[in-house]
Image: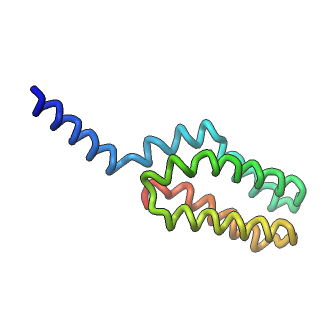
Amino acid sequence: MIKRIFLALLLAAILFSTCACDPVKKPLDNRSGFSKYLKQTEDYIRSEDWGNAKSSLENSEKAWKQIKPILQVDIDHDYVNDIEGDFVKLEGYIDTQEKPDSLVAILSIQDSWENIDSL
């Protein structure tokens, strides 16, 4: 009986560790609104509404800070560092109102986030 319980727990741990990010990502995103804030930031950049872009970026960063500790358990830290580096660049680009560079940075963050479960 104890062997069966141990085997079941071991199999569950292996299964969870191989696919943990995907079932965790969506509820985290829904709760934090991270994707929504990123899309808003992109829309503000495209319309060159720099004040709202800055505000939306701050909301995105707050949501990221909620998500990050949970994801770091399962995700390679290099990907987390890449997203954070893009946030720093994006903030500078928004401050200087650099539309092309801002778009590249926000799209890079969005792409990393959308594909983080496959990384």
Q: Quadrant of residue 28?
A: top right
Q: Position of residue 30 (x, y in %)?
A: 60, 38
Camera-side residue: 67 or 116? 67
- For the rendered model, the colour scheme is rainbow
Can you say whether 57 is above or below 70 in the image? below
Q: Between residues 53 and 1, which one lies in front from this camera angle?
A: 1
Outermost residue to the front: 2
Q: Quadrant of residue 108?
A: bottom right
* Residue 35 appears in view: no
- Total marks in image: 0
Q: Nearer the viewer, residue 45 or 72?
A: 72
Residue 100 vertical position relative to residue 26 in the rendered view, above or below: below
Q: Is residue 31 visible?
A: yes
Relative horizontal placement of residue 105, taking residue 26 as reference (left or right): right
* Residue at point 54%, 49% (across, down): 69
Q: Horizontal placement of 5 versus 28: left or right?
A: left
In the depicted structure, whether residue 75 falls above or below residue 29: below
**Image quadrant where one finds the C terminus:** bottom left
- From the top left corner, tell me how far across and down residue 50 is, in percent: 88, 60
**Which residue is drawn at the image coordinates 49% and 57% (left, top)?**
116
Tell me what residue is drawn at x 76 percent, y 55 percent: 57
| In this rendering, position of residue 13 left or right of residue 90 | left
Percent x, y of residue 36: 68, 45
Q: Position of residue 40 (x, y in %)?
A: 76, 50
The residue under the point 43% across, 41% down is 23
Would residue 23 appear left or right of 107 to someone viewing this image?
left
Location of the N terminus by quadrant is top left
